[in-house]
Amino acid sequence: MVRIIGIDYGEKRIGVAASDPLLITAQGVATVKDLQELKNVIGRYDDVQEIVVGLPRSMDGSLGIAAQKVLAFIETLKAETGFNVVSWDERLTTAAAERMLISAGVSREKRKKVIDKSAAAGILQSYLDRKKK
């Protein structure tokens, strides 16, 4: 059995999700503030195969300043963890996570606490779905 970790990187918070061992579903597991906390969360799993990080492309597909920061983070994450780290197009995942939480009746206060890990789960689920095809 293996597992894939999904990450929604932000300068203030990092959302983290993990796949189930069969690589079918993604679940948000944590929101952390820095690389050390992230490494601690990843360390909870002994079967991690790779890490997927959402890459915020512009709607035209280009890479802006935020994407450049994510690419730099990916290089740091590779060096710090030794895992295979891949980027995945994350256009609109945070917006989709926000809409889902609103439709579920989650208050604004609670949404702030879970939006990042929900976005990470969306990124990872999209990646898992694509791998199945």
Image (cartoon, grey):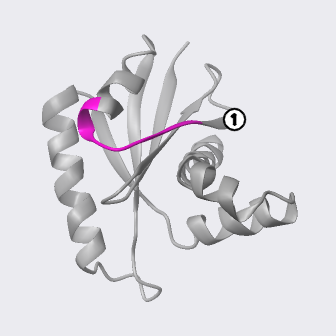
Q: Which type of secondary structure does the marked residue at label 1 adopt?
A: loop
Whether 59 is among the magenta residues is: no
Where 120 falls versus 21 (above or below)? below
Residue type at mark 1 is: Thr
Q: Is residue 8 visible?
A: yes
Seen at 64% across and 37% down, the residue is 26
Seen at 47% across and 86% down, the residue is 59
* Towards the viewer: 119 or 75: 119
Q: Quadrant of residue 28?
A: top right
In x, y percent, where is residue 36? 25, 31
Q: Is residue 122 visible?
A: no
Where 102 falls versus 40 (above or below)? below
In x, y percent, where is residue 90? 49, 64
Residue marked by disc 1: 25
Magenta stretch: give its range: 29-36
Q: Is the residue marked by circle 1 packed among few (<14), some (14-19), or many (20+) residues within 10 Å?
A: some
Rendered-image quadrant of the N terminus: top right
Q: Quadrant of residue 85?
A: top left
Where 100 falls versus 129 (above or below)? below
Name, please, the residue furthest toward the bottom.
Answer: 60
In x, y percent, where is residue 87? 36, 54
